[in-house]
Amino acid sequence: MSELEEWSTSRLLTTAARLVDHAWNERLLDIGITHAGYTTLGVLSRQGTMTGVKLALAMHVQAQTIGKTIEKLERQGLISKIRDSSDRRSQRITITAAGIDALARAEDIERTLMVGAGLESSDLRHLLHGIIDELAPQRHKSAAAG
């Protein structure tokens, strides 16, 4: 029996996620972004300009977690921050033309990585959707309470 057979499902899932993240980051080095940066650009491209708090919620992470990613993407010119005209303390984040180009390149890498590794499976996608749908509302409740 393989050692993996003894692992819990949660350990298998978190290890697989970490390995996919590492594989992503290795391939994204040419573009100069991380997997978190790619995800951030994708959310901004699909959902438009938003605050850092809304961006964090859309990505299912804490606002503090996304801060370094936002700073790095801004330094690279892939996103920009705009002062909110109704609330001068708040900033809205938007993707730039360079960010859209980087996102397109990263999407090509994603297609290659996912298909090449045999990770494009509708069954796997369905199971992952179920996990996210089940756990994401709990995270939002915890964040609102904290």
Image (spheres, helix red, strand yellow):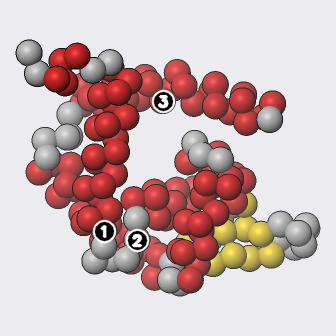
Using the numbered discs, state the Cα–Cα distance from disc 1 to disc 2 in whole angstroms. 6 Å
Residue that appears at 20% across and 40% down: 120
Return the x and y of residue 59 as percentages of the image width and height: 55, 48
Q: Residue furthest left?
A: 1
Residue where numbered disc 2 is placed: 33
Q: Where, quadrant-wise, is the C terminus in this rendering?
A: top right
Residue where numbered disc 1 is placed: 28
**Helix, strand, or loop for circle 1?**
helix
Using the numbered discs, state the Cα–Cα distance from disc 2 to disc 3 in whole angstroms. 25 Å
Whether residue 96 is visible, yes or no, is: no
Residue that appears at 47% across and 76% down: 99
Return the x and y of residue 15 as percentages of the image width and height: 31, 37
Q: Amino acid at mark 2?
A: Ile
Q: Amino acid at mark 3?
A: Ile
Return the x and y of residue 36 as percentages of the image width and height: 46, 58
Residue where numbered disc 3 is placed: 132
Q: Quadrant of residue 34?
A: bottom left
Using the numbered discs, state the Cα–Cα distance from disc 1 to disc 3 in whole angstroms. 25 Å
Task: Please determine whether, in this image, residue 22 is positioned above or below residue 87.
Answer: above
Q: Quadrant of residue 110?
A: bottom left
Residue that appears at 11% across and 51% down: 116
Q: Quadrant of residue 9?
A: top left
Mark toward the start of the polypeptide (2 vs 3): 2
